[in-house]
Amino acid sequence: MRDAYQEQLDELAEALAGMCTQVADAMQKATRALLECDLQLAEEVISEDIRVDDLRATAEERAFALLALQAPVATDLRIVVSAIHGAGDIERMGDLALHVAQAARRRHPQPVLPAEVAPYFAEMGRVGVALALKAGDVIRSRDLSTAAQLESDDDAMDDLHRHIFSVLMDRNWSHGVGPAVDITLLARFYERYADHAVAVARRIVYVVTGRMPGPLTV
């Protein structure tokens, strides 16, 4: 009986880690669509978002079934409760990748990004995808040192986000209000994507230690 119960907990963790892989793939594709004005790739991200929603629903059903049927306590209870919250964070990451893809589709065939800011968004995409994949690794391993790394990795995204604003506020900005609004929103999507990945890692720290951290330290 205990072995079957532990297997259910492991399956729940694996489902969440799989969601992280899914939203990492979505952000990678959305970033390419944004940078390359690739309408087909943007449409692919948009159409596949429902899969992330379905994965969240399945993870939550599993978690609520465990609460109802197994009455978990202590660490097991923290696993289940954190899974419910974590599924929401990861689904939101998928939604943010969706917003990036929608921006690429909305402006197609015109580029969304002026050439001088495109490299910063390429880097934001790279950082975001790496954070999502690392969050999945943390879910599987419950390794606190890896969880702590997400906090410092997120600093790189925050730096990029701030730099984008310095570019927009420069008096030499020549692209007008419309592109500035698009860029401001897109930068926020990437920044929030990273924040949700960090939130997932913080929940794993809570699972292991019983304490919800502020900034992650080990």
Image (tube, rainbow, N blue to C red):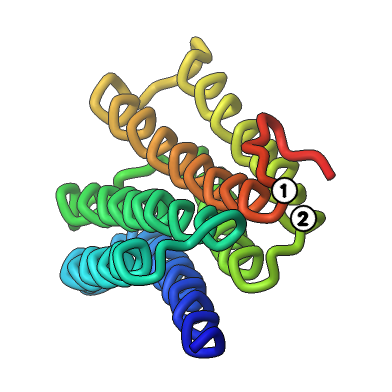
- Is residue 213 among what the camera can see? yes
SS class of the residue under badge 1? helix
Residue under the point 20% across and 64% down? 46
Residue 148 percent location from the top left of the image? 75, 48
Q: Is residue 87 left or right of residue 45?
A: right
Q: Tag on residue 15? A: none
Q: Quadrant of the C terminus?
A: top right
Q: Tell me, yes or no, whether the two marked residues, 1 and 2, touch with CB atoms within 8 Å.
A: yes
The residue pinned by badge 2 equals 144
Where 170 falls versus 129 (above or below)? above
Which numbered disc flags the more N-terminal residue, 1 or 2? 2
Dot 1 crowding, Cα within 10 Å, few <14, some 14–19, many 20+: few
Nearest the viewer among 178 and 204 is 204
Residue under the point 29% across and 69% down? 65
Residue 85 percent location from the top left of the image? 40, 49
Q: Nearer the viewer, mark 1 or mark 2?
A: 1
**Quadrant of residue 187 within the rendered picture:** top left
**Quadrant of residue 63 within the rendered picture:** bottom left
Q: Amino acid at mark 1?
A: Thr
Residue under the point 53% across and 57% down? 73
Nearest the viewer among 194 and 55 is 55
Q: Is residue 110 left or right of residue 214?
A: left
SS class of the residue under badge 2? helix
Nearest the viewer among 66 and 34 is 66
The residue pinned by badge 1 equals 209
Q: CA distance from mark 1 to mark 2?
A: 9 Å
Where 39 falls versus 6 (above or below)? above
Q: Amino acid at mark 2?
A: Leu
Residue 163 percent location from the top left of the image? 60, 27
Residue 82 percent location from the top left of the image? 48, 52
**Quadrant of residue 15 within the rendered picture:** bottom left
